[in-house]
Image (tube, helix red, strand yellow):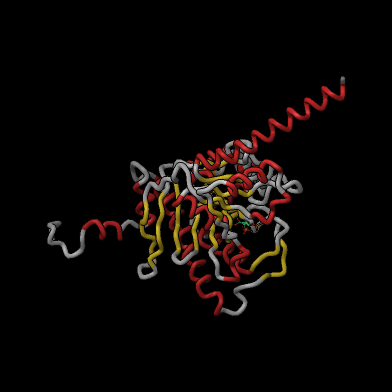
Amino acid sequence: MGNSDQSIVPEHSLDRDCTTLSRHVLQQFSSFTAEAQDISAIMSRIALAAKLISRRLSRAGLMAGALGFTGETNVQGESVKKMDIYANEVFISVFKQSGLVCRLASEEMDKPYYIPENCPIGRYTLLYDPIDGSSNVDINLNVGSIFSLRQQQGDDLNGEAKDLLQNGDGQIAAGYILYGPSTVLVYSLGKGVHSFILDPSLGEFILADENITIPEHGPVYSVNEGNYWQWEESIREYIRYVHRHDGYTSRYSGALVGDFHRILMQGGVFLYPGTVKKPEGKLRLLYESAPLAFLAEQAGGKASTGKERLLDFIPEKLHQRTPLAIGSVEDVELVESFIKDWARRTSEAAAKETISSNS
Ligand code: FBP
């Protein structure tokens, strides 16, 4: 059958149906180097983890013991869900006997996990949040997994993973999986942001959107307003501003991945500010905020701690938390302007106070 227009299957849709994740990753490299093969193989293993978790989530309500709490508390001080542990172990299992990833660090593990048979060949470290939005798991609402790939530097003999305490520009790849009505995988290798949808009939992630860009501005602001009285006045002022101005609407799903995906596709801003009690906020930098910030910037958006570019932030510890404002450039800059303005007014007032108390 020549490629004449008599072809039964329109060429473009066949070509699209054949654009699997591993093929698309290889296409990102100019040639099939060892690095290209490694990254493509690593992404295929992440896709396998996503399929296993998606299958478990879709049947969890019918399986005994798949939902609910384990009774344990993790390094974050949070009660652990059984799905958190299942998903965490899936990510470890898919990389066994791979020679690819030597070390895995996740929200559910105090210290990194080493896969001896992969070390030292596997020079890559995978940082991940196996189930993001855990509070949604037992009630069948959307959840996600977030991942970030980095090159291991040094031998990390003491297991302190100090080489991971770097800014976010050192990420080689980042992405997330959204377990929603369909299972979507979004990733970037620093060459644009691309999304794939799991076609259950093929068992393959097939290309859906390439070079996704975040609109300059969007109507959505996504934040847990239940924390209103715990925030600094600057954030309260921002929220009062969007309440009083037309064109803004609130959306908050309780799962960062779901809220970020909406903003990636439609624009707007997601916010998880620090609170007076917890100025660092809740979200973990290395396997929640930094991977999404990498995607946001690759899609023409912005990510900030409120005071600085999030990808410039250097963590002091593996499970470091930071405040997060992420999404459309205009909307993130609006949040930053309220924080900067409040800091300026507060320091001016303090200076006036000092002068008047000295006079
Ligand atoms: P988990 O990774 O433990 O689920 O925590 C992260 C998260 O659930 C985000 O997905 C979500 O945006 C946020 O915490 C919700 O926190 P809160 O319930 O305080 O609004």
Q: Position of residue 218 (x, y in %)?
A: 48, 47
Side of 241 where 32 appears, left or right: left
Which residue corresponds to the image point at 72% horizontal and 66% vertical from the top-left? 72
Decide: is 200 above or below 350.
below
Q: Residue at x 59, y 49 (%)?
A: 243
Examine the rendered structure and indicate whether residue 304 appears above or below residue 145.
above
Q: Which is nearer the eye, 349 or 246?
A: 246
Q: Is residue 181 visible?
A: yes
Q: Quadrant of ligand 1?
A: bottom right
Q: Is residue 341 left or right of residue 214?
A: right
* Residue drawn where x is 52% and y is 52% of the image: 260
Q: Residue furthest top?
A: 359
The percent coordinates of residue 182 (x first, y second) are 44, 65
Rendered position, 191 above or below 64: above
Quadrant of the frame with the C terminus? top right
Look at the image and tell me whether residue 157 can be seen: no
Q: Is residue 333 above or below residue 229?
A: above
**Horizontal placement of 14 versus 28: left or right?**
left
Q: Nearer the viewer, residue 329 or 189?
A: 329
Residue drawn at 43 percent across, 54 percent down: 41
Q: Image quarter for residue 114?
A: bottom right
Q: Position of residue 190 (x, y in %)?
A: 44, 42
Whole-percent x and y of residue 129? 58, 56
The residue closer to the viewer here, 225 or 165, is 225
Res 225 quadrant in image: bottom right
